[in-house]
Image (cartoon, grey):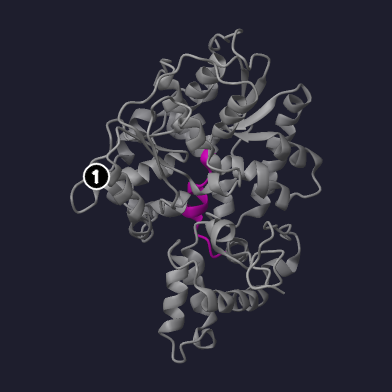
Amino acid sequence: MREGSLEAPTRHVIDWQNPDFYDMAKIEAEAHRVFDICHGCRRCFNLCDSFPRLFDLIDTSATGELDAVAPADYKRVVDACTLCDMCFMTKCPYVPPHEFDLDFPHLMLRYRAAELRAGRVGRMSQELVKTDRNGHLAGAVAPLANWASDTGNKLTRPLLEKLAGIDREAALPKFHGRTFAMRAKRAAPEIDRTAPAFGRKAVLYATCFVNYNNPQIGTATRAVLAKNGVETEIAYPGCCGMPQLEQGNLAKVAESAGKVAAELSPWIDRGYDVIALVPSCALMLKFEWPLILPEDAQVKRLAQATFDISEYIVDIAKKEGLAPGFSGLDGGVTLHLACHARAQNMGQKAAEMLRLLPGTRVAVIERCSGHGGSWGVGKGNFEVALKVGKPVAKQAAKNATAYLASECPLAGTHIVQGMEKLEDGAKAPAGGARHPIELMAEAYGLAVAS
């Protein structure tokens, strides 16, 4: 056995239908094994708060070793994990096929699955991640919902904090009365038949966030692809299940995977590529679903057909070439590479895409924003999320570019909040953080309705 590992990391199928998967005594034994290896390595000290918590528990124990840490305290480590996968993908030298066989994020997932099965996840927490139900309800009363969730609302946000455990200072996504799927039923953008990539066809998996919270990402994507000759259709069978994955609800994730894969399969039969508009959802389709339903042929096929949107634009640029007509972005772009984009192991596709714009300076930040999905807005988590993301906010403020972008819309909003809370009172660029595909649409001069 060699020290560290030079082979490409591999992941095991998640054995979530095995009763032993939920046996807390066995989970704690595995956690002890993994945590002891982490204690002897400590390369992950500057990632999420899980590792500082683990090392503090050990260093302040009676012996200074893991054997003096009570297994009950492991929960503090688990609670800080955002399932960003960065320890597995970028730091850990002991991931499979190394003999130590470490997969820290999936161990945290297993612990949460056992907690959920034991009834230790609050009812309100489970209700908050029902994105489709919540999106339909909030969209029907979007102005009222957005008023109530605004951080400046001193009447409703303290109530929301008390009832739902959402920190009163955490910015929340806005809702729209007309979803992206509704908007797509109107006239589609005209396809440029002279574009080099004319003939490509893609179905856009809308994702719950784009569908309910930020349709502009979807309309910008359609506009840019139409400019490049790509015919697009929209499909949204339902949420990918990432919010449920964060809580360890693997049965619900499997249900979502089966439903979405079944609906998208006919599009693949007809020669359409599949594009996921948010990196967390692309990660689910490409990597997590096949580990949860390894025998499902439709899930496996969908994983092979799925692109992240930035990945798809770069693929066009390399194979056919992009349609002419775009200009540079004066003042440069600070681009945050989302953890779930990095975890797709596809390279810096958003940076590659924006560097295609002539004369555009792209400053890349390749570090976790700290947000962590639904975790990051929780009371008790929001301040931790700001602490983890502070280096990103400081770097964005230092860059002082005209544009700020993140592949993850939630991370982008969190970075803006982090910049506003810096000691020097830094301000984000006008317009806040945007998705890179929105900047591509602007570079093409394409009007995208809000």
**The N terminus - image quarter:** bottom right
The residue that appears at 81% across and 48% down in the rendered structure is: 295
Q: Is residue 248 magenta?
A: no
Q: Which residue is mark 1?
A: 155
Q: Is residue 118 visible?
A: no
Kindly state the secondary structure of the residue where label 1 is placed.
loop
Please tell me which residue is depicted at 35% across the width and 46% down the height of the picture: 415
Residue 90, compared with residue 308, is above or below; it is below
Q: Residue at x 56, y 75 (%)?
A: 35
Q: Which residues are magenta?
A: 118-131
Residue 395 image offset from top left, x and y in percent: 32, 49
In front: 291, or 43?
A: 43
Q: Is any atom of residue 90 visible in this view? A: yes
For image coordinates 65% across by 64% down, the residue present is 95
Query: Along the horizontal axis of the image, is 382 left or right of 346?
Result: left
**Is residue 125 a member of the stretch shown in magenta?**
yes
